């Protein structure tokens, strides 16, 4: 049996000014990995491709990987990058494999298509109308009819932080391959709700998503093959942004519809619990000071500027407030500022330097812009910025921060990097000689994923409303294209007349 495994993965923040070109999908190489190189990079890792490879290996199938293209979240995907990735996957489908396993995230917006994955699948169907296709999606997928119409089976992550990527892909691949080998006939039911849950309220350690995902798993033990509840990605001003559900059963459309309706009702009933209520930044930082003691670090979370939601990773408001309120013994991860990295590398280790940090990239989607922060300090360390990931989200993969400098003002150590990565693995500090557990304060530009590596280390978490295109205050963004009315942008409290 011949199986094609491929990745086209991007979470598009349509408010983000960060450019998404082919280089962003290429992990620092000339183009995205493929073939044997991709197979050896992802084999046995906690990634979707790792899970698909495991499912294929179990049945002794031979695999080909035309492209594994995953880019960190950012603005709309450039057409030339989308066409390159699509062409590689469609060409592989045209060669007549027995099955295709696709890692697609499910929130890709391109310059030309608001449903990038639907467009890819539509093109695959032109050359391979009968090809069995299993799709693995992120919990932040924004689902469209074309994705469901053209996929054979779909499975989404059930955890946030996403610690079940390989399991999700494995499950979806295995169900498809079992269906091929037996009389099983997977059918799908899906639906979406006009609601935009705040990302800060989507964590699966917290109510309400914890309860929803528990019910999802129960359904998989009560007759469904695979059940997925997508909380959606709200920083995408596109028609179908929002929460959705997909249920796969073995030929039982009625059961699939029933489970879908039950989950949609559960989610709608808890819509108010998905609203995040930010507090003023100065109040949060003052609260962090009150919480500080000897028992462990207080984490200040700069969640408006999370690079893994499309943030520029260079807004300065939270760090400025930390410095103004005089916090000491702080380690910060991190700032994306390649220009300052170059300046500091030229100055050399030990040099005292004045820098203008951050706020390099204008954010036209926001009325209020960030301002650069003038700092004087010393170059403490210079690194090539690579470290092996150890936490469950990306175990087995190498993290690449690009050329990296640790800059110290005396009271604050700031990691300044040249490639965007979200700090969810403490290795981002430890690989630079910083022991995060021994600091009085940590500042991280993250939203939920930090929990996977940092919750065991920190004593308290204080969520800080800074500035950025991942703002948790929807009133700072202008939505023009998302379906209306939609909760909570509009005060709707009834679905009557809104069912799709
Ligand atoms: Zn996600």
Image (cartoon, rainbow, N blue to C red):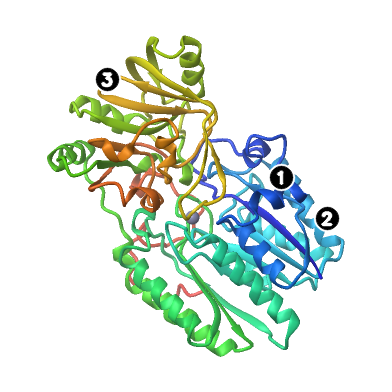
- The residue shown at (80%, 73%) is 130
SS label for mark 3: loop
Which residue is at the front of the view, 194 or 188?
Answer: 188
Q: Which residue is mark 1?
A: 33
Q: Which residue is depicted at the point 54% across and 48% down?
A: 12
Image position of 481 (left or right of 124): left
Q: Which mark is residue 390?
A: none
Q: Position of residue 379 (x, y in %)?
A: 40, 17
Can residue 93 be seen? Answer: yes
Q: Is residue 11 above or below residue 499?
A: above
Q: Which residue is mark 3?
A: 410
Residue under the point 19% across and 35% down: 282
Closest to the observer, 498 or 216? 216
Instruction: Report the side of 315 relative to 390 (left or right).
Output: left
The quarter of the displayed image where residue 423 is located:
top left
For this view, does 95 lie left or right of residue 454? Answer: right
Please tell me how crowded label 1 is: few (under 14), some (14-19), or many (20+) other residues with Cα within 10 Å: many
Q: Marks 2 and 3: which is nearer the front?
A: 3
Residue at which label 2 appears: 91
- Closer to the chain start, of discs 2 and 3, is 2
Q: Position of residue 483 (x, y in %)?
A: 49, 60
Picture coordinates of residue 448, whole percent (x, y): 38, 52
Quarter holding residue 478: top left
- Local crowd at mark 3 within 10 Å, few (<14), some, or many (≥20)? few
**Residue 228 in the image: above or below residue 327:** below
In this view, the residue in front, 458 or 71, is 458
- Disc 1 under 8 Å from ligand 1? The reply is no
Mark 1 and mark 2: span between their CA atoms? 16 Å
């Amino acid at each position: 049996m011949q199986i094609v495994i491929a990745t086209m993965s991007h979470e598009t923040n349509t408010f983000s000014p960060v450019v998404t070109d082919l280089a962003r999908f290429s992990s620092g190489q000339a183009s995205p990995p493929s073939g044997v190189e991709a197979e050896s990079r992802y084999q046995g890792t906690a990634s979707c491709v790792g899970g698909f490879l495991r499912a294929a290996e179990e049945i002794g199938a031979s695999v080909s990987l035309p492209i594994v293209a995953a880019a960190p979240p950012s603005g709309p995907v450039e057409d030339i990058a989308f066409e390159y990735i699509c062409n590689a996957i469609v060409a592989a489908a045209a060669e007549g494999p027995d099955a295709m396993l696709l890692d697609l995230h499910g929130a890709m917006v391109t310059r030309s298509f608001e449903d990038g994955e639907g467009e890819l699948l539509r093109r695959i169907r032109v050359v391979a109308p009968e090809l069995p296709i299993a799709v693995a999606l992120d919990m932040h997928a924004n689902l469209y009819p074309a994705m469901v119409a053209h996929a054979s089976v779909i499975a989404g992550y059930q955890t946030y932080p996403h610690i079940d990527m390989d399991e999700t892909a494995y499950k979806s691949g295995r169900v498809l391959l079992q269906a091929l080998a037996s009389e099983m006939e997977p059918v799908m039911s899906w639906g979406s709700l006009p609601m935009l849950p705040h990302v800060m309220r989507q964590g699966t350690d917290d109510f309400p998503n914890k309860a929803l995902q528990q019910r999802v798993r129960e359904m998989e033990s009560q007759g469904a093959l695979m059940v997925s509840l997508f909380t959606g990605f709200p920083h995408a001003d596109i028609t179908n942004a929002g929460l959705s559900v997909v249920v796969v059963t073995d030929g039982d459309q009625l059961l699939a519809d029933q489970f879908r309706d039950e989950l949609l009702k559960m989610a709608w009933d808890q819509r108010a619990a998905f609203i995040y209520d930010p507090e003023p930044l100065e109040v949060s930082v003052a609260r962090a000071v009150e919480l500080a003691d000897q028992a462990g670090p207080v984490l200040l979370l700069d969640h408006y500027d999370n690079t893994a939601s499309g943030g520029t990773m260079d807004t300065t408001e939270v760090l400025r407030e930390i410095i103004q309120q005089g916090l000491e013994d702080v380690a910060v991860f991190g700032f994306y500022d390649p220009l300052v990295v170059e300046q500091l590398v030229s100055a050399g280790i030990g040099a005292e330097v004045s820098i203008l940090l951050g706020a390099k990239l204008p954010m036209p989607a926001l009325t209020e812009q960030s301002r650069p922060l003038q700092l004087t300090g010393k170059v403490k360390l210079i690194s090539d910025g690579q470290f092996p990931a150890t936490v469950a989200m990306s175990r087995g993969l190498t993290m690449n921060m690009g050329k990296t400098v640790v800059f110290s003002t005396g009271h604050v150590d700031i990691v300044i990097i040249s490639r965007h990565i979200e700090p969810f693995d403490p290795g981002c500090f430890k690989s630079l000689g910083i022991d995060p557990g021994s600091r009085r304060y940590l500042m991280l530009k993250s939203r939920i994923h930090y929990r996977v590596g940092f919750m065991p280390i920190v004593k308290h978490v204080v969520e800080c409303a800074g500035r950025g295109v991942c703002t948790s205050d929807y009133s700072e963004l202008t939505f023009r294209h998302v379906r209306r009315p939609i909760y909570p942008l509009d005060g709707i409290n009834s679905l009557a007349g809104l069912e799709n």
